[in-house]
Amino acid sequence: QKEVEQNSGPLSVPEGAIASLNCTYSDRVSQSFFWYRQYSGKSPELIMSIYSNGDKEDGRFTAQLNKASQYVSLLIRDSQPSDSATYLCAVPGDTGRRALTFGSGTRLQVQP
Amino acid sequence: DARVTQTPRHKVTEMGQEVTMRCQPILGHNTVFWYRQTMMQGLELLAYFRNRAPLDDSGMPKDRFSAEMPDATLATLKIQPSEPRDSAVYFCASGLVLGSRYEQYFGPGTRLTVT
């Protein structure tokens, strides 16, 4: 069983700051990684996917992957109160098995 | 705007009753998942279908839960008999493999309360 670890938070940052969310995973063979955002009472929403080492940028979001160290992070620049949510890191199962293993999520609070 | 749909959105039932939840995956997606989310356990995989065939239901209590996919547009999750510990939000998700890329999208969920 793959394990995905996240700090549950809450992580509190002021509006306009950079929020940094981290995730570590146990399986060295994982090839793809996903970040989901979940607002209270809503379903998880896919916001970033990353498949190779390095950085991937999409608007104010940057995902960073370091396979050697087995961690993936999500940076949110110019954080807004609307970014306040729980952020879930997810890793697929074994090759061919596409079900995701989710971390417990990090709750982010952006203070106006 | 393609999205996963789930019905009902909310269900309150008494212990011992049968509960059926339905999911319509995104058209063209070939994988369908059922997850359960609680505060204590987080998101847990219950069952997984690919091309309508069940591939993994190891996360599901077999004595009371069953999952089926009678056609490509409908997946069902049934609990019989329901128990208070089944109270949770049940999410359906669908996904599509494109070469080495893969993305999975969640439906809005069914909030189940068993009294």
Image (cartoon, coloured by chain):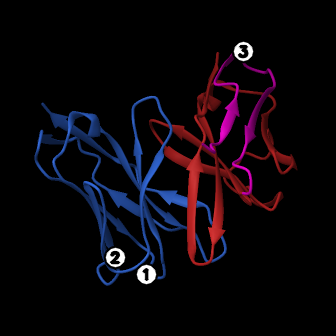
* Three-letter code for the amino acid on which mark 1 is drawn: Arg
The 10 Å Cα crowd at callout 3, few under 14, some 14 to 19, many 20 or more, is: some
- How far apart are the alpha carbons under marks 2 and 3? 45 Å
Q: Is B55 drawn above or below residue A39 in the view shown?
A: below
Q: Nearer the viewer, residue A101 or A80?
A: A80
Disc 1 vs disc 2: Cβ atoms closer than 8 Å? yes
User: Which label's residue is closer to the chain start, 1 or 2?
Assistant: 1
Q: Which residue is mark 3?
A: B14
Q: Which residue is mark 2?
A: A70
Q: Nearer the viewer, residue B2 or B50?
A: B2
**Residue A92 spot, x, y in % from top left:** 54, 67
Write down the chain letter for disc 1: A
Residue B8 magenta-highlighted: yes
- How far apart are the alpha carbons under marks 1 and 2? 7 Å
The residue segment tinted magenta is B1-28
Image colour assigned to chain B: red
Write down the chain letter for disc 2: A
Could you tell me which secondary element the residue under label 3 belongs to?
loop
* Three-letter code for the amino acid on which mark 2 is drawn: Gln
Q: Which residue is mark 1?
A: A28
Q: Closer to us: mark 2 or mark 3?
A: 2
**Dividing the image into 4 quarters, which one contains the C terminus of chain B?**
top right
